[in-house]
Image: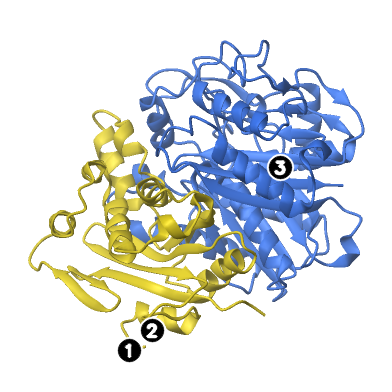
Amino acid sequence: MNNVFVVADNITSPIGYTAAQNFEQVVKGNSGVKQHDDADRSPSPFYASLFSKDQFIANDNHTKFEQLLIASVADALKSCDVNATDKKTVLIISTTKGNISMLETAGDDPGLADRIALHTSAKIVAENFGFVNQPLIVSHACISGLVALITGLRLLQTGQYENAVVVGADVITRFVLSGFQSFQAISAAPCKPFDATRDGINLGEGAGTVILSSNPKYAGNIKLAGGSISNDANHISGPSKTGEELFYAIDAALKNAGLSPGEIDFISAHGTATAYNDEMEAKAINLAGMQNIPVNSLKGYYGHTLGASGLIEAIIAIHSLKQNTIIPTKGFNALGVTQPINVAALLVQTNLTNCLKTASGFGGCNAAIILTK
Amino acid sequence: MTDNLYITSYATITDNTIYGNGDAVFENRDTDTAEFLLSAYQFLEVKYPKFYKMDGLSKLGLLASEVLLKGHPFAERYKENEMGIVLTNANASLDADIKYFEGAKTVASPALFVYTLPNIVIGEISIKNKFKGENAFFVFEQFDAAFVHQYVAYLLNNNILQACICGWVDLLQENYKAVLFLVEKSENNISVPFTPDNMNNIYQFNKI
């Protein structure tokens, strides 16, 4: 099967409009998470990483969600020679809630179901850049971004396409925030992944794009070397009690990449800062025998960006590999999971070759990818 | 290029009728979608109380999977992580989204919110049948047999899965359709080759 390389990337977030800007901000320890008092989204103040109200304003042609997708893809395409209009290039979009805010703003419109549909947004974005193939859309809860990357990997490995533009985005609306609030899942302060005093998530807005190619001319680039997806088959809103199924995904992704657990230099975890998620991940990391490998969570910088999170966090991992820099887990102070894991608390500069990135989500889904230098 | 793969079972729910391998097994005219799904649950004797708390999309997908897997010895034949689910639809979870959104005008319900993701139907089928392997949910304007075929064939041909439920599960208010295929590596007495043409023919009710 073909090798698959990372050609270009972008992060569009409240802390920067390019991947380089974003990496610089997280190296400095800067976060997009702050307190918001916004009656349109919540009756009470909340912590989240949000764009200001004058950024990505919806217009007649493009919603905020579509503008985020377009801004992120445009920047990534600009920095490489992959051609969107090539019949060997496919667009893959990842999101959980897409244009759901239209329920709030256009609820009485009879054409609402068509305009809100994810395939409508996908068509709009594809036409904007002249993609000729039908765009693919992944909507698989919080692992959507990694499922989109894994889908791109497989389509390129088998030669179905040569290039994949993989983009994810989500917007934080009253709909999404009220749902997580109803679960009592939102922290009253900046989130603290893996910490003893962690008490929930912050949500975040953003978009991320990774352009993949099997063209051997990119052989010197970071490689997407493997990926795998599993299901807990346990509970639709609570993670596995044992971590076994995330471990299956980690184990299968490592085998797919031809690596052993000991060859991984750092883990970019999901680390949402809920009690159950972080505990489950610690168990899975132990089942994999990876408890001494540095692990970080980026939720303290971005919040949980839902369908964008897998992409944004994978892109930071790509830049970590390039810069030989492990980003610390913002918000972490003292280990608060029952299994020993090596949470990266301080910025570390060391030689890095291989990274494991994981994610888990509602519906009992888990995903893992391997990035190598 | 590939091993031989077969559709060893298929199930369709549309227009107030349930079909197993092309034969009508249950029909209940003159009811709305919610009543129809409940009557089908009772007729099929699923006896799974979690059904009552599910959203329409999950109910539709679960009932189709019950017909699809009826009498199949999958639990003896395969390990949990050798079985997976790949589903597609047009309206994602919009039906549940609208119900959650309307309810949240007074009080936001976590029991409704959890269904505002289309992959929850995969989670529900996985929980009932202990499927722990690969799973993915994709959105298309129309059923795309070619994409589902190539994605699922990759999973089986690379031994990532040994059996996969795949197909289309879409529900928005009174419009719904489910067409599920069980894909395996060995034939049985009713199997047909796993090809996009056979998938399309089954989806469109053509003779195969």
Mark nearer the viewer, 2 or 3: 2
Q: Given the image, what chain letter belongs to the residue carrying mark 1? A: B
Q: Nearer the viewer, mark 3 or mark 1?
A: 1
Residue that label 2 marks: B201
Q: Secondary structure at mark 1?
A: loop
- Name the residue at 61% across, 23% down: A33
Crowding near the residue tagged with mark 3, few <14, some 14–19, many ≥20 C-alpha atoms within 10 Å: many
Image quarter for residue A173?
A: top left
The residue furthest left is: B30
Q: Which chain did the image draw in blue?
A: A
For the residue pair B144 and A110, the one nearer the viewer reads as: B144
| Residue type (three-letter) at the residue carrying disc 2 | Asn
In the rendered image, which residue does mark 3 sit on? A314
Label ID, residue A58: none
Specify the farthest residue to the bottom: B207
For marks 2 and 3, give the CA distance: 40 Å
Extreme-front residue of the structure: B76
Q: Is residue A238 visible?
A: yes
Q: Chain of mark 2?
A: B
* Spot occupied by residue A325 in the image (x, y as percentages of width and height): 86, 30
Which residue position is annotated with label 1?
A: B207
Is residue A127 in view from this perspective?
A: no
Residue drawn at x 38%, y 61% as measured from the top left: B73
Considering depth in this image, is B111 or B185 the residue closer to the camera? B185
Chain B visual colour: yellow
Residues tagged by mark 3 and mark 1 found on one chain of the structure: no
Q: Secondary structure at mark 2?
A: helix
Quadrant in which the N terminus of chain A is drawn:
bottom right
Residue in the picture at 35% in, 64% down:
B72
The reply to whether the C-beta atoms of the residues labelled 2 and 1 are less than 8 Å apart is yes
Instruction: Point out residue B116 in the picture as x, y percentages from the top left corner.
Output: 37, 44
Quick one: label 1, few (<14), some, or many (20+) residues within 10 Å?
Answer: few
